[in-house]
């Protein structure tokens, strides 16, 4: 690696630099390429139709350091590569942008698969017990490493991540993410009531700790900060106001919280904020809505709430495995697309309320949630959702979510024959859409052959088939 760099090898640069959008890249020479069947999206297939995706049967993605330098036919690009460029070939493999998860809890890796409770009991019995361990930086660092390994194994290269109330948990997470050069959005949870004493901060402390983390990590390399009030039940009005102040002072930060997941949760919010017209109005009162605001679940929304979310361009995170497992309800995609007040929607795993790190498994459950409501999820729309769709939901579509010159080199390679059952079913597949639907219905981490993060292969498994 690297032999092609810096030696004035102009022949090697032929035809590769014209697509660059970032002037700083113009001096960078390709050092790696990935060959296989390339699929990427430039728009939403639901609205833009067939022109929303590009598919190249024998394609090449050329990487220069941490960015994509070129994407095209292998036959056209191979001859332009400088000597010494590594070409990773995946015959039959499907090369896609790395997957993006818009809502997940890293401290819940040992909460996932906890039996028999709906939301508020589940939090009390499981999640809020486990999260107490994260005041210990060593524990937080070990779990952050496990979590990021697991995301890479599942092809996920970016996520919006909840830490715990302890600033140490966010420090540990960002440090591990920075070490791997993953683009992550994360934040320390704000929680100053209705939680175990060991998990409470105060409005002032939560503000100060969040501010220090923003100053330390937001925009440092690929790390981004999300102001993270857990949900209205566990924050006082003073704390929600402090969260709003943080966002005003740091407009580049995201905001993440939970909204309208469970009926008892909604009733509790009604009693805690009797002045509020509805649950969403609580967050609105404190300035928490907006294009960088991510609201987990949004299952039982009233029309007035949809209007508030729509007019503020806020994002609803649809978490199907969680909504089924915790028994919360069915996300209504058709209603979210109602032209009267359309919502921006992201797809998410919500581990550990969610039951899988895999966005392929998540698509399978999203499909079933929609089937139960006589709605559908075509395969091209599904793969758009977990790549460019989620990049747009996070406002990061100029950096991630597609395979194009200048984009960050986060890439996943899938194998639709990863298991005997998949290989057997694959024999009857005739179209790209059928192959994608097979991957989302039967696929999981076993179908992820390789994951590249910032141009480095951080996960690889040799296929059996
Ligand atoms: N609402 C508040 N906290 C949580 C959480 O950790 N998981 C889920 N699913 N819902 C929540
Ligand atoms: Zn959640």
Image (cartoon, helix red, strand yellow):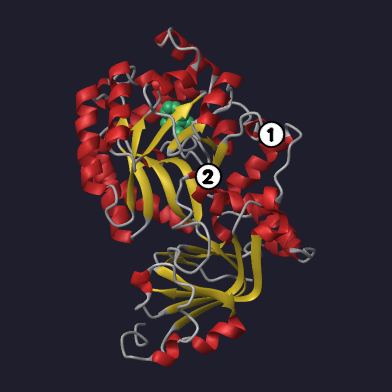
Residue located 48% across and 18% down the image? 279
Q: Position of residue 198 (x, y in %)?
A: 24, 25
Residue located 42% across and 23% down the image? 283
Residue 356 circle label: 2
Q: Nearer the viewer, residue 87 or 459?
A: 87
Q: Is residue 367 left or right of residue 145?
A: right
Q: Earlier in the sequence, mark 1 or mark 2?
A: 1
Q: Position of residue 129 (x, y in %)?
A: 34, 28
Q: Position of residue 440 (x, y in %)?
A: 65, 52
Q: Is residue 336 left or right of residue 50?
A: left
Residue 334 circle label: 1
Answer whether residue 220 is visible to the viewer in this image.
Answer: yes
Residue located 56% across and 49% down the image? 389
Q: Quadrant of the N terminus?
A: bottom left
Label 2, secondary structure: give it: loop
| Label 1 environment density (alpha carbons within 10 Å; few <14, some 14–19, many ≥20) | some
Q: Position of residue 456 (x, y in %)?
A: 39, 69
Residue located 44% across and 58% down the image? 399
Q: CA distance from mark 1 to mark 2?
A: 24 Å
Q: Nearer the viewer, residue 81 or 414?
A: 81
In the displayed structure, would residue 252 be above or below residue 323? below
Residue 383 circle label: none
Judge depth for marks 1 and 2 and give the one in front: 1
């Amino acid at each position: 690696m690297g032999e092609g760099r810096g030696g004035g090898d102009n022949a090697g640069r032929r035809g590769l630099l014209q697509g660059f959008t970032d002037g700083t890249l113009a001096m960078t020479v390709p050092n790696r390429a990935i060959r296989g069947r390339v699929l990427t999206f430039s728009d939403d297939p639901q609205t833009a139709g067939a022109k929303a995706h590009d598919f190249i049967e024998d394609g090449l993605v050329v990487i220069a350091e941490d960015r994509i330098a070129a994407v095209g036919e292998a036959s056209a690009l191979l001859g332009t590569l400088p000597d010494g460029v590594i070409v990773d070939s995946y015959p039959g493999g499907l090369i896609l942008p790395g997957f993006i998860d818009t809502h997940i809890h890293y401290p819940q890796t040992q909460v996932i698969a906890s039996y028999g409770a709906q939301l508020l009991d589940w939090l009390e019995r499981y999640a809020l017990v486990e999260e107490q361990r994260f005041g210990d930086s060593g524990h937080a660092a070990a779990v952050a490493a496990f979590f990021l390994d697991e995301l890479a194994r599942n092809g996920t290269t970016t996520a919006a991540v909840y830490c715990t109330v302890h600033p140490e948990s966010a420090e540990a997470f960002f440090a591990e993410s920075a070490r791997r050069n993953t683009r992550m959005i994360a934040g320390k949870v704000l929680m100053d009531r209705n939680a175990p004493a060991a998990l409470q901060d105060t409005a002032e402390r939560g503000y100060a700790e969040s501010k220090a983390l923003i100053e330390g990590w937001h925009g440092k390399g690929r790390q981004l900060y999300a102001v993270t009030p857990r949900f209205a039940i566990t924050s006082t009005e003073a704390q929600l106001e402090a969260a709003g102040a943080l966002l005003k002072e740091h407009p580049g930060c995201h905001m993440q919280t939970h909204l309208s997941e469970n009926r008892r949760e909604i009733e509790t919010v009604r009693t805690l904020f009797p002045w509020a017209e509805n649950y969403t109005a609580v967050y609105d009162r404190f300035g928490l809505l907006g294009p960088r605001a991510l609201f987990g679940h949004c299952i039982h929304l009233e029309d007035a709430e949809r209007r508030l979310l729509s007019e503020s361009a806020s994002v609803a995170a649809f978490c199907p495995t969680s909504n089924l497992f915790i028994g919360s309800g069915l996300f209504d995609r058709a209603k979210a697309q109602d032209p009267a007040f359309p919502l921006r929607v992201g797809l998410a795993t919500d581990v550990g309320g969610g039951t899988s790190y895999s966005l392929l498994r998540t698509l399978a459950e999203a499909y079933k949630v929609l089937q139960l409501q006589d709605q559908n999820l075509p395969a091209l729309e599904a793969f758009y959702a977990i790549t460019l769709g989620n990049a747009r939901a996070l406002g990061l579509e100029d950096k991630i979510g597609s395979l194009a010159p200048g984009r960050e080199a986060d890439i996943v390679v899938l194998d639709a024959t990863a298991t005997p059952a998949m290989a057997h079913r694959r024999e009857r597949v005739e179209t790209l859409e059928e192959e994608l639907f097979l991957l989302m219905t039967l696929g999981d981490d076993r179908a992820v052959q390789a994951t590249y993060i910032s141009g480095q292969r951080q996960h690889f498994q040799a296929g059996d088939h």
